Amino acid sequence: MDGPVMSDPGDLRQRFDGLCADIRAAADRSGLTAEMQIKAFVAAAMQVLYRGEGGCGGTISPRTRDIVVVIANSLVDVADACAVSAGDDGRDRGSIGSRLLTEAAAVFGTSVPRILSARQDRATARARQAVCFVLGEVPHWSLPRIGRFLNRDHTTVLYSIAKARAVAATNPEFAAKLREVRTRARVP
């Protein structure tokens, strides 16, 4: 049979709804802004799409992939517009934290969803350690608050801060990246 192999539309909808619910729950637990929730959703959807597992159940035509990329880029544009009105519900959703996540992802060559995930590859771990280290120096950001923001235990945050400090002392490249993250995120 030629052409894309697709699962039952009802099954796809159920998988899609489950993915949306998981992303919403993770974003709410971490206190992300609307901008970051949309970007996390787009990143996770693209990851499922490119893997072709779990979400689509088979191969995807290049034309479909192109359409999804255009839609994803449009959603990212919407997310950028949401950044202007962060904190839609009037609560402090951690704009410093959201900026740090975005900038750490860019500086370390990873993504925000990867930083918030359980992934332990070096770039992701270093970016997460950088976020913990910088937030640890921001007034009113306690270890438990940082932990909630990153969906980690406060002792993990403490270890990440110590690890970042130790690596920065021996690795000038990492120390420079820490400074760059702090500067780009406009952290005092």
Image (cartoon, rainbow, N blue to C red):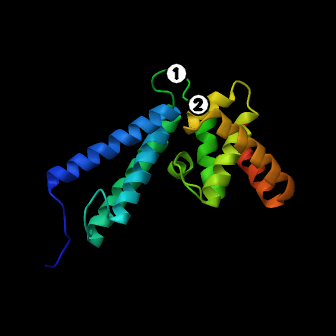
Report which quarter residue 156 is drawn in: top right
Horizontal side of residue 167 vs 39, given as left or right: right
- Identify the disc placed on residue 60: none
Secondary element under disc 1, as helix, strand or loop, is loop
Residue 7 versus residue 134 in the image, above or below: below
Image spot of residue 21 (x, y percent): 34, 39
Q: In which quadrant will I find the C terminus?
A: top right
Write down the residue under mark 2.
94
Residue at 40%, 51% in the rendered image: 42
Q: In which quadrant will I find the N terminus?
A: bottom left
64 vs 150, nearest the viewer: 150
Horizontal side of residue 188 vs 37, given as left or right: right
Residue furthest to the top: 90
Disc 2 residue crowd, few under 14, some 14–19, many 20+, Cα 10 Å: some
Secondary element under disc 2, as helix, strand or loop, is loop
Q: How many marks?
A: 2
Residue at 67%, 43% in the rendered image: 131
Residue furthest to the right: 169
Amino acid found under the numbered disc labelled 2 = Gly
Whether residue 81 is visible, yes or no, is no
Image spot of residue 108 (x, y percent): 65, 57
Image spot of residue 11 (x, y percent): 18, 52
Whether residue 127 is visible, yes or no, is yes
Amino acid found under the numbered disc labelled 1 = Arg
144 vs 188, nearest the viewer: 144
129 vs 35, nearest the viewer: 129
Write down the residue under mark 1.
91
